[in-house]
Image: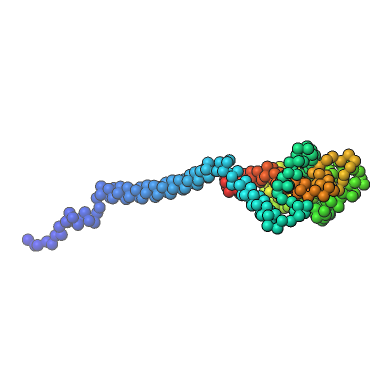
Amino acid sequence: MPHENTVSADPRSSSEEHSDPRSLSEERSDETKRDAHGVSARSARSTTDTADELRTLAAGLDALQTDAATRPSAWRRIRRSVLPPVLCVIGLIAAWQLYIVVANPRPDIVPAPADVLDALTSTWDSGQLQQAVLTSLERGILGFLIAIVIGTPIGLLLAEVKPLRRAFGPLISGLQVLPSVAWVPAAILWFGLSDATAYFVVLMGATPSVINGLIAGIDQVPPQLRRVGQVLGAKRWSLASLIVLPAALPGYVAGLKQGWAFSWRSLMAAEIITMGGTMGFGLGTLLNTARDLADISSVLATIIVILAIGILIELVVFAPLERRMLRGRGLLQGGTR
């Protein structure tokens, strides 16, 4: 019988050549599990990153809240803002007294601090100081408020209407540079020796500063705010009054401070020059009366009162207004001023 060469099929070789469907499904299942595990790992990392970002944001918000919560107390703020100038005044008085002791000048030229205090006490006891302070404050505050009412719309008009600004802008700047005392002779001829003279001089001193301060503030308003207002449908004057004016507050407040300084100085000049008639008795009148009597102690005492009122208005009115405005804009952290 002839020998036939037969090739026997090895089960292991056939299993290598032809995969078992069952093992393929297991492999696919393993790959699916690995892919799912990779996706879940990436998702976990993404969730972790998001959680880290949220924790960072929360930490920043907590820091802001902590800054607001850890603001210094009212007493600490007062001590921080009031104590340095008080110590400065005490140092100046000590140096003044030291000069009196060392140089021993004539008392009718350079009085001692005690002499000035005696003159101030005497004027207070007579009631003249209270009357002069009330009269000058009434004139100064009322005249300054009228200047705000007049200067604010004019400033808005000149800032928004460019032809008017080009025409009247140099004139307003010139009026601001012009010394207010130059208006006193003309005011006396126009209004006589009356309170109207003092009010007119105050207006001419304060109004240009209010106008220029508002114009400067409006010039610094970002143009994006105007475009946003126009997109929201704001008309020209509603855009100016509701968007531009609030955004221009820093420059406007600076103009108000300068306007008050000019109005106070203008009032003192008017009260010193104009005496008699129906003019009331103000601090300038008190100062001029002391000068006529050659009472240097009363002159210095009145000057100190005028200076103290100016500083008090700054501390009570403008400094808190500036702090509130800057803090509301995020430009001032609690307790930095």
Q: Is residue 41 left or right of residue 120?
A: left
Is 15 situated above or below 151? Answer: below
- Direction left: furthest residue: 1
Q: Position of residue 20 (x, y in %)?
A: 24, 50
Which residue is located at x 42 percent, y 46 percent?
A: 47
The spot of residue 251 in percent (x, y) is 71, 50
Q: Nearer the viewer, residue 121 or 13?
A: 121
Q: Is residue 143 visible?
A: no
**Which residue corresponds to the image point at 59% horizontal and 47% vertical from the top-left?**
80
Please state the horizontal and vertical placement of residue 111, each as a whole percent of the image. 74, 51
Can the viewer see residue 250? yes
Which is nearer the eye, 45 or 181?
181
Residue 4 position in % (x across, y down): 12, 61
Q: Residue at 86% across / 41% down in the picture?
A: 279
The residue lying toward the viewer, choosing from 327 and 182, is: 182
Total numbered labels placed on residues in the image? 0
Residue for point 71% across, 50% down: 112
* Picture quarter with the N terminus: bottom left
| Along the viewing direction, whichever of 165 and 304 lies nearer the viewer | 304
Farthest right residue in view: 189
Q: How is the image coloured?
A: rainbow
